[in-house]
């Protein structure tokens, strides 16, 4: 919220929406004339900007700046969705860092970012598409709150924190099949043979590829994905633990609690209480790009 002791954000224009992309589709290369915010909803893309390549996964926030030359290359999987905002800054708040120091990608933005993006895009849907009129004060404040949460809490992404997601194609196909199953409520059981069939290799070969690229077996990966989804549901919903166990495909709340405690060091009820009291979440057991999908 702007105060008398600091300058507030001032915009020339603001527009946005949600774009859908096909498997293997390419957007760009293009040079952007204004500021952009992209929020990955579904799908995975290789994002190139000014000669640097990043892998953008669901939940990733991308902050290209004017003059960036960028390209999106979408992975060979269906249902890619991207929320976007375009805007032109006339004046930045005085407590923001210099734009040169803004991160390009934020892999784990504050949880408020998704709802703020959703609220902005809903309101922008009531104005003419790509309107270059000055946005309302309310919309400007929403964008200021969104960017403030990111810029005042997040250091620029260093090379040491960039994940490497290059894996054998059969592994990617098997992970994609796992993620498809997680869209079902509750998710269906999957066997190693079914995953191998989706990957186009034998079960033995798939297991070797998983061990060499992820140091996990396919079924261990599937179990960790269930637990990671459970952690997200404990944090962001009021569902009872038993309902979360069922949603994540565990045969009983007791078995779920035992597996969860083994993975995260504390039982689900203790972790939920800590999260609601503002404590940091336990360390994620999986790489960023294989976590359950992030929706609004």
Image (cartoon, rainbow, N blue to C red):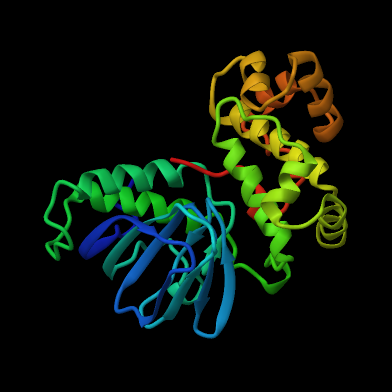
Q: Position of residue 47 (x, y in %)?
A: 51, 71
Q: Position of residue 280 (x, y in %)?
A: 68, 39
The residue sitting at 53% across, 56% down in the picture is 60
The residue sitting at 69% across, 64% down in the picture is 169
- Position of the C terminus, as image quadrant, is top left
Q: Is residue 151 left or right of residue 240?
A: left
Task: Give the number of marks.
Answer: 0
Residue at far bottom of view: 51
Give 201 or 259, whichever is nearer the viewer. Answer: 201
Give 38 or 171, whichever is nearer the viewer. Answer: 171
The residue sitting at 17% across, 56% down in the picture is 135
Query: Is 192 rendered above or below residue 85?
Result: above
Q: Is residue 277 visible?
A: no
Q: Position of residue 265 (x, y in %)?
A: 84, 31
Query: Is 264 rendered above or below residue 174?
Result: above
Can you tell which quarter of the image residue 270 is in?
top right
The residue sitting at 77% across, 22% down in the picture is 256
- Position of the N terminus, as image quadrant, is top left
């Amino acid at each position: 919220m702007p105060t008398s002791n600091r300058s507030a954000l001032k915009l020339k224009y603001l527009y946005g929406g949600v774009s859908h992309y096909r498997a293997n589709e390419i957007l760009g290369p293009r040079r952007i004339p204004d500021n952009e915010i992209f929020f990955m909803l579904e799908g995975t893309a290789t994002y190139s900007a000014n000669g640097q390549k990043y892998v953008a996964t669901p939940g990733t926030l991308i902050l290209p700046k004017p003059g960036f030359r960028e390209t999106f290359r979408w992975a060979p999987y269906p249902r890619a969705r991207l929320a976007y905002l375009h805007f032109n800054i006339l004046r930045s708040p005085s407590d923001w860092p210099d734009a040169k120091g803004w991160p390009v990608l934020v892999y784990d933005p504050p949880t408020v970012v998704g709802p703020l993006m959703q609220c902005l895009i809903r309101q922008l849907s009531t104005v003419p598409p790509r309107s270059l009129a000055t946005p309302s004060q309310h919309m400007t404040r929403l964008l200021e709150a969104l960017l403030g949460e990111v810029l005042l809490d997040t250091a620029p992404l260093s090379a040491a924190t960039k994940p490497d997601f290059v894996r054998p194609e059969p592994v990617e196909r098997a992970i994609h099949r796992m993620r498809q199953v997680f869209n079902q409520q509750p998710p269906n059981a999957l066997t190693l043979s079914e995953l191998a069939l989706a990957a186009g290799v034998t079960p033995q070969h798939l297991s070797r590829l998983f061990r060499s690229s992820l140091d996990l077996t396919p079924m261990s990966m599937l179990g960790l994905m269930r637990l990671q989804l459970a952690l997200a549901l404990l944090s962001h919903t009021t569902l009872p633990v038993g309902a979360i166990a069922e949603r994540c495909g565990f045969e009983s709340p007791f078995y779920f609690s035992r597996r969860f405690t083994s993975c995260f060091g504390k039982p689900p009820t203790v972790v939920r209480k800590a999260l609601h009291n503002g404590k940091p979440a336990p360390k994620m057991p999986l790489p960023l790009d294989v976590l359950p999908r992030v929706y609004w």
